[in-house]
Amino acid sequence: MQRLGLAGQPQRQWRERFEKKRVTAAQVKDLVRPGDRIFIASNCGVPETLIKALVESSDDLADCEIISLLTRGEAPYVDQRFHDRFRHNAFFIGANVRDAVNAGHADYTPVFLSEVPGLFKSGKVPIDVAMIMVSPPDQHGFCSLGIAVDVSMAAAASAKKVIAQVNPAMPRTHGDSCIHIDQLTAAVEHESPMLEFPPGELDDVSLAIGRHVASIVPDGATIQAGIGKIPDSVMAALAGKKDLGVHTEMFSDGVVDLVDAGVITGRRKTLHAGKIVASFAMGTNKLYQFVHDNPLCEFHPTEYVNDPFLISQHDNMVAVNAAIEIDLTGQVCSDSIGTRFFSGIGGQVDFIRGAARSRNGRPIICLPSTAADGQVSRIVSFLKPGAGVVTSRGDVHFVATEWGIVDLHGRTARERALALIQLAHPDYRKELFNAAKLRGLLDQGQPEPRDNELPATDLELRQTLANEVEVHIRPAQLTDERALQEMWYDLTENTVLRMSPTEHKTLPRQRVREMLTFDARRDLALVATVLLETGRERIVGIGRYATDRSTGYAELGILLHDDFQGLGLGKAFMAVLARHARRQGVRGLTGAVAIGNYSALELFQSYGVPIEVTSDGTMLQLKLTFGEHLPQSGG
């Protein structure tokens, strides 16, 4: 009777075939010929044993081309000793080959990561030998590419020869991550520790960026984030979210922590529900143990994971990517520092475009506002000569620094410049403002932003009103100019008259600019916004105070759209404005309103301290003194 395997099929006699493929590391040289193009597996899945054997026994080789994505560990083939034997071609530049590329001793191929497999499969970049790392075969003869599926699957499928380092330390992963021993030309069995990429220490700048990003991530969102301090900070800031999903080019240890905390469940994903989908992973052994034989995690080739059309099928897709610098029109440089190549295009544009086409998607570019210990601004009037534009100004949406987050999509060049200047470090804002005027991005009547310090975090407030609509109260920005005019011209005449019988019926640009230009050390302007289904913010209220230095009192003004009156928004404004005023040493608040404007009177009274009311027969003069009184409510 024929013996059956676990799957109920005849047991395949693959073990004998595998035995014939076993070779020693010293025999690897016999499988490579002069002039071959050799693919080396990526990231932390680098087959170090095969690389060492190739280089150490390369006396008979010449003019071989070695291609790879980012690789960890050593890259001895770029050493000048081997220049007549190997030339490296990086599809993404890592630290181990960066100097060689910029010295002209190695090459760089700029290409979207989603398109790299197509180069191999089409033969446009033919591969003679693919060197990969895999797990030992299972009972059916399948090895796993483990944590480095990425483009290795396409390379192995396209290569004339496939040499595998069979490493018991390589995790076995689920998904489209397996290769059968029949696809291997040779196998070198050698156990070595997996390369690790431990997370760096998070600093105040990256933590602030993480908080800004997390502020626009809704519960149930699907996340893409890379590796490094900023992505790690974003993951840390997502700890309070619910039912997040993951569809990402790669992930690291931070995902494990969010799974353990019950934050990442994948329940609301619209594709691969309940699964973490990636093409590779880089982290510590903690991560590798987590993904090993874990059905929660699926690894798929890059041409699938990074396909912008597939990415766009995830509702609420949030793509978080890094940048080196960004100019005032929104052009993003991510692969070079001037003429010096630094990294690569990678999957940034794949995910930015995919998230942009997602229902309620949020593509985000993140960068610290400065570099070189604060000596260089990363937000610039012009990109450095030779800098490469990875994400075009037409693709950019959200941009975040430690100073805030803005949405540039659909914004004019003027609005973009103003928004990005406010994201720049205060030391560089005046310089950028003047440069923007010289470029013609700003008109000569544009006032210079006066707030030169980061507002306290408690100036932001999210509150659900009595009509069950969530409003976001935040510091006003110069880019709110048009939205504030839109609110003004949507007010009823009765609302305008209640403010003042002599109030103008129009709100010209110059007056709006005066309302939005303030120094947070003594003045403040806040707006309340609601998020429309289109993803656009709508201003539904503004609250301001301006301090009179001679008296120490600040004049208060709050204006609400008709649809948002009587819902508690005025009291929310009052609470934030009064709290900030007290902290800035303001003696109290004053206001002048039309007689009969009882809502303004009630608003002052709601703060919970005594107020003075006087009248000239036309207007009510309201005065609230902080003194040592503590508010009974709201403040």
Image (cartoon, grey):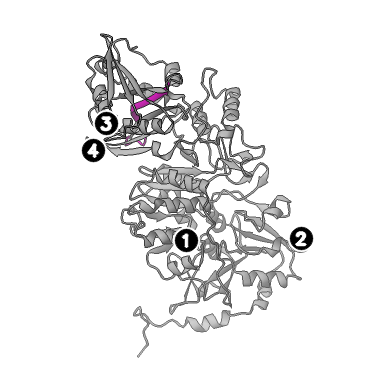
- Alpha carbons under labels 4 and 3: distance apart: 26 Å
Disc 1, disc 2: CB below 8 Å? no
Left-right relation of 453 to 624: right
Q: Residues within 10 Å of mark 4 (few under 14, many from 20)?
A: few
Q: Viewed as shown, does residue 305 lie left or right of 562?
A: right
Image coords of residue 494 (percent x, y): 24, 16
Q: Are marks 4 and 3 in contact (CB under 8 Å)?
A: no
Q: Is residue 554 above or below residue 310?
A: above
- The residue that label 1 is drawn on is 253
Q: Amino acid at mark 2?
A: Gln
- Of discs 3 and 1, which sits in the foreground? 3
> Which is nearer the eye, 120 or 364?
364
* Viewer-proximal residue among 552 and 16: 552
Q: Nearer the N terminus, badge 1 or badge 4? A: 1
Residue at 43% x, 78% y is 140
Q: Which residues are magenta?
A: 531-547
Magenta residues: mostly which secondary structure? strand
What residue appears at the point 28 percent right and 9 percent down from the top-left corner?
Answer: 616
Name the residue at 55% across, 83% down: 19
Q: Is residue 370 above or below residue 231?
A: above
Q: Residues within 10 Å of mark 2 (few under 14, many from 20)?
A: few
Distance between the alpha carbons at the discs numbered 4 and 2: 67 Å
